Image (cartoon, rainbow, N blue to C red):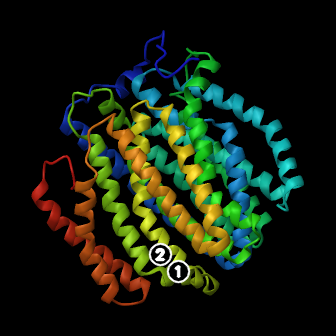
Amino acid sequence: MVGPSTPLPSQPSPHQDRVIAAHTDDGTGAREASVGGAIRLSVEIPIRVLSILATLILTRRLGVLGFGEFIVTLGVALVLAELADLGLTQSLIPHIVSGRRSVRDIYAVKGQLTAGMIGVGALAVGAVATLSPLDPVTVALCVVHYVGAGWIECVGNTLRAFGRRSAEAALLLVFRSVLVGLIGLTSLGDSPRTVALAYALALVPGLLLAPGLVSRHASGPRTTGSWIVLCEALPLGLNSGLARLTVRVEVFVLRFLDLATGLGLFAVSLRVVESLLTLPSALAGGALPALAREARSPEAGPGAAQRTLSLVAWVGIPAGVGMGLRAPEILALLGPDFVDGAPILRVFSFTLALCFLNTALFHILVAAARGPLIPKLTALRLAAGVSFAVILIPRLGGFGAAVGYAASEVVLWLCLVRAAGHSVRFSIARPVGAALVGTVPMGLALWFGPRPLLLAIPMAVIVFGLGAALMLSGRRGSTSLG
């Protein structure tokens, strides 16, 4: 089988030559990781605000039971839509950085998978309708949404790899803004089926913009056969499919056991966490070109990887602490019926920092071309999730689902630290310890400060920012924030 080490017979394009210009010294890699991650994060924050706003609208309109059912539908659609990508989007940036494959090669294969998905998807939706009580129209619309969103993400990754971050930001902001507008300003958010219709319609502006933005990077002849490209991407595709299942195992088990209230409360807490989990993806994704260069230069010391882990620790730990301390108030914003899920959200607050670190560690493995190992680790996480879910959910309902999710992330974290440590040099303890210390003043401010979130959140951000600035003021020039 053709693997990631298969040589490319042709030479990199001029665009790729610019992308893979040498950046192997320690300081440059760390700075590039910081800049790339920070720029991507600045783009992702308004997108996350829009996503949270959409969740706020949906929870208030659908209620606990309707929202839980919609999350199940999204989970099924997300797994089915992975058949239209199979890891191509994730493999795109490392391929561009290394010059191994052209953008046109990857886009051609993704187009073929998308075309095949039309027939396979129709059969799969029919099977879902036969074997479950889910509405087939709602499932089909959600599949359309995720397949189209996959193309928008693929174009965004291409633009990022070639340094066109403002174009990437514009594309993603248009996509999310249209979705929130359709849900919030029309009657499309009144039922799961109409919400799914809004999700599908929101693709139109982004898909119209995408070809014009990426056309110059996807021009030129193909250099590699489809089978070679697909075989190289398959490990990441398998991992992505397994990952889709891992974050929905508890949802599916709760639905199977017909624990409707527990499903709704767990689903909304999971949604809150998922809205934040794109932040480490943004930080690590923005640093991915620097991570790939560092992985190709093993003689370099800790640089891009260390800085990336430090960044996600300094974002994830305070976010988790704040979420845990103010869980009831956060859920009250989504609707009074969701406040009973505060214990579940507090469990997720502990999990959040682990999820942030795990996301960064996965990106390090992707950059180091450890593709075949990644699905094995995700399969281990899935097996742990299934085991904990089967044991805990029948006894503890939604709370047991949250505990099982947290325990599974601990298992994954232990494995990822060991695996990534074989590829690049980094320290976990230093940035995590520093971030914990830096979060203490913010935690005290949230514990003793004003109860209204509109006052507490700005105060906590200011206190954390001042404390972090004081801690980091003596570390100028270091490649680590911890």
Is residue 363 visible from the viewing direction of this image? yes
Q: Quadrant of the C terminus?
A: bottom left
Q: Are marks 2 and 1 in contact (CB under 8 Å)?
A: yes
Q: Position of residue 45 (x, y in %)?
A: 44, 61
Q: Relative to residue 323, is residue 5 depicted above or below?
A: above
- Rounded to the nearest whole Å, what is the CA distance between mark 2 and mark 1? 6 Å
Q: Position of residue 94 (x, y in %)?
A: 44, 31
Residue 91 is left or right of residue 448, and the answer is right
Which of 370/448 is in front? 370
Which of 126/118 is in front? 126
Instruction: Tell me which residue sits at (61%, 87%) in the image.
Output: 336
Q: Residues within 10 Å of mark 2 (few under 14, many from 20)?
A: many
Q: Looking at the picture, which amino acid does disc 2 mark?
A: Arg
Quarter where residue 465 is shown: bottom left
Tell me the element at label 1: helix
Identify residue for label 1. 342
Identify residue for label 2. 346
Q: Position of residue 283 (x, y in %)?
A: 38, 50
Residue 64 is left or right of residue 445, and the answer is right
Residue 25 is left or right of residue 387, and the answer is left
Tell me the element at label 2: helix
Instruction: Tell me which residue sits at (58%, 56%) in the image.
Output: 385
Is residue 204 visible from the viewing direction of this image? no
Q: Relative to residue 348, is residue 419 depicted above or below?
A: above
- Going by the picture, which residue comes out furthest to the left? 474
Instruction: Tell me which residue sits at (33%, 52%) in the image.
Output: 38
Q: Residues within 10 Å of mark 1 (few under 14, many from 20)?
A: many
Quarter where residue 122 is shown: top right
Q: Relative to residue 185, is residue 434 depicted above or below?
A: above
Which of 365/319 is in front? 365
Instruction: Tell me which residue sits at (19%, 46%) in the image.
Output: 479
